[in-house]
Image (spheres, rainbow, N blue to C red):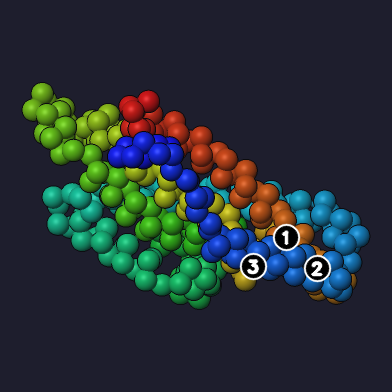
């Protein structure tokens, strides 16, 4: 570089980032300590390899994925429904939706799972009295209780995400659509929701990833997901840490795959909004 005043060359001194080097050294030291602890700890790695593809673990993996998908589908359906209800001019619908969101966001998920699983203590039978009735204990299986607990709870959170997405769309577009005679449901389906997806997808994608991990709570009501099946095995053979490592690896693997899918989904719905209009 040349000094514009004297014309003499300037000496450029590179900035030294001592803080970065120190932080890097500390992080590497911590990672080395963790790796060494697992390497020399009382962990039988052959046992980890043995049970990594055990039938019970793989069945738990399948059950986890199935539950995450169906519970999230229920949660998204309820979320869209109650988000629309919250924004409805009808006070009955609006306040009912607010009550739903308030209750299911205000109580712990594990408590909700236990309530659904023990619903027979409150309602011994379900149906139309005198016409058709079923024993609740036969209907509310661990699968059904987990689906209702996770799905309905997720719906309360998704409702707020969807509402935020709807509010992000310029209200002028709604007014323009209504001015040319489009009904409110058509405006929502054709104008508002497609644009709101750009805002909705990232948090809903994160919620789906969280749902995979939240299925582990269903082990308390005997649903056979990965953690439940891993616990069943280590109760029998005493290899606690080995089976927990197996479960952890599978959770990380599933979440990693979903994270990649979320990235491409976000990129798809963000087209036209990226820098430079590309």
Picture coordinates of residue 164, whole percent (x, y): 28, 50
As drawn, 156 above or below 254: below
Q: Nearer the viewer, residue 12 or 196?
A: 12
Is 257 on the left-hand or right-hand side of 210? right
- Marks 2 and 1 sit apart, C-alpha to C-alpha, by 21 Å
In the image, residue 13 lies at what x, y percent?
50, 50
Is 27 on the left or on the right of 272, as rendered?
A: right
| Residue labelled with disc 2 | 36
The answer to whether 65 appears left or right of 115 in the picture is right
The answer to which quarter of the image holds residue 54 is: bottom right
Secondary structure found at label 3: helix
Give the alpha-carbon distance from disc 2 to disc 3, as whole Å: 15 Å
137 and 259: which is toward the camera: 259
N-terminal of the two: label 2 or label 3? Answer: 3
- Which residue was labeled with disc 1? 247
- Which residue was labeled with disc 3? 26
Please rate how many residues cluster around mark 2, counting C-alpha atoms within 10 Å: few if below 14, some from 14 to 19, many from 20.
Answer: few
Residue farthest to the right? 46
Can the viewer see residue 180? yes
At x 61%, y 50%, the residue is 255
Q: Position of residue 174 (x, y in %)?
A: 16, 34
In primary-sequence order, the first of circles 2 and 1 is 2
Q: Position of residue 242 (x, y in %)?
A: 81, 66
Q: Secondary structure at mark 1?
A: helix
Q: Secondary structure at mark 2?
A: helix
């Amino acid at each position: 570089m040349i000094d514009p005043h004297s014309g003499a060359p300037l000496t450029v001194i590179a900035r030294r980032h001592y803080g970065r080097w120190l932080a890097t050294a500390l992080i590497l030291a911590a990672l080395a300590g963790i790796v060494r602890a697992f390497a020399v700890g009382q962990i039988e790695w052959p046992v980890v390899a043995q049970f990594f593809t055990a039938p019970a673990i793989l069945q738990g993996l399948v059950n986890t994925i199935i539950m995450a998908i169906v519970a999230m589908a229920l949660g998204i359906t309820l979320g869209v429904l109650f988000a629309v209800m919250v924004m409805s001019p009808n006070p009955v619908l609006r306040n009912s939706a607010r009550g739903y969101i308030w209750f299911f966001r205000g109580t712990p998920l594990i408590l909700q799972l236990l309530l659904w699983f023990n619903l027979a203590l409150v309602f011994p039978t379900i149906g139309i009295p005198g016409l058709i009735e079923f024993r609740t204990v036969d209907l509310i299986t661990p699968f059904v209780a987990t689906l209702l607990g996770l799905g309905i709870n997720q719906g309360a959170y998704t409702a707020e995400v969807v509402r935020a997405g709807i509010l992000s769309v310029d209200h002028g577009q709604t007014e323009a659509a209504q001015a040319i005679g489009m009904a409110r449901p058509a405006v929502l389906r054709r104008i508002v929701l497609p644009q709101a997806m750009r805002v909705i997808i990232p948090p809903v994608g994160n919620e789906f990833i969280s749902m995979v991990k939240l299925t582990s709570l269903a082990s308390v009501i005997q649903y056979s997901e990965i953690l439940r099946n891993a616990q069943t095995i280590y109760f029998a053979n005493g290899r606690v840490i080995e089976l927990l490592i197996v479960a952890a690896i599978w959770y990380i693997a599933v979440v990693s795959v979903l994270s990649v899918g979320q990235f491409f989904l976000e990129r798809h719905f963000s087209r036209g909004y990226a820098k430079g209009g590309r």
